[in-house]
Amino acid sequence: MIRTVLVSLLILLTWAGLMVLVVSHPGGDDTELAEYYIENYEEDTGAGNAVAAIYLNYRVYDTLFEALLLLVAIVGIMHFFRVGVRRE
């Protein structure tokens, strides 16, 4: 019982954290931001590749939270469907 509550709380906190990130994003036109990335990625990050600079420096928190969300989803599915446990 307590395990179910803890897994549910973990899923809820992860979801709430992601919603805070989504709501705090200003939105709007991202062309200025894209132009900034293209023009300044070498100076800002020292990376020779724009894609690597964007994923590993500018958007690292997005990448980490996406991986965390995937992990929490897998843990939740395994817990609630009890994968690998025989039912009597």
Image (spheres, helix red, strand yellow):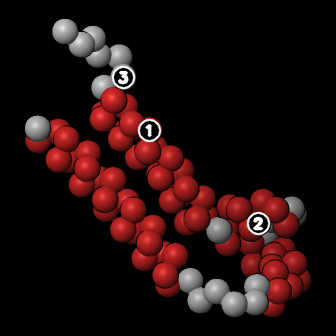
Q: Give the secondary structure at mark 3.
A: loop
Question: Depth check: 12 or 55 in front?
Answer: 12
- 10 in relation to 51, above or below: above
- 55 in relation to 24, above or below: above
Question: Depth check: 44 or 82 in front?
Answer: 82
Q: Give the secondary structure at mark 2.
A: helix
Question: Between disc 1 and disc 3, whose residue precedes?
Answer: 1
Crowding at dot 3, Cα within 10 Å, few <14 / some 14-19 / many 20+, comes out as few
Q: Are marks 1 and 3 in contact (CB under 8 Å)?
A: no
Which quadrant does the N terminus fall into?
top left
Q: Position of residue 48 (x, y in %)?
A: 87, 63
In the picture, measured across the screen, residue 2 lies left or right of residue 85, that is left
Q: Which mark is residue 6?
A: none
Give the amino acid type for the residue marked by disc 1 in the picture.
Answer: Ile
Q: Position of residue 50 (x, y in %)?
A: 85, 66
What residue would you read off at disc 2?
53
What residue would you read off at disc 1?
74
Give the amino acid type for the residue marked by disc 3 in the picture.
Answer: Val
- 22 in relation to 69, above or below: below
Q: Residue furthest front?
A: 88
Which quadrant does the C terminus fall into?
top left
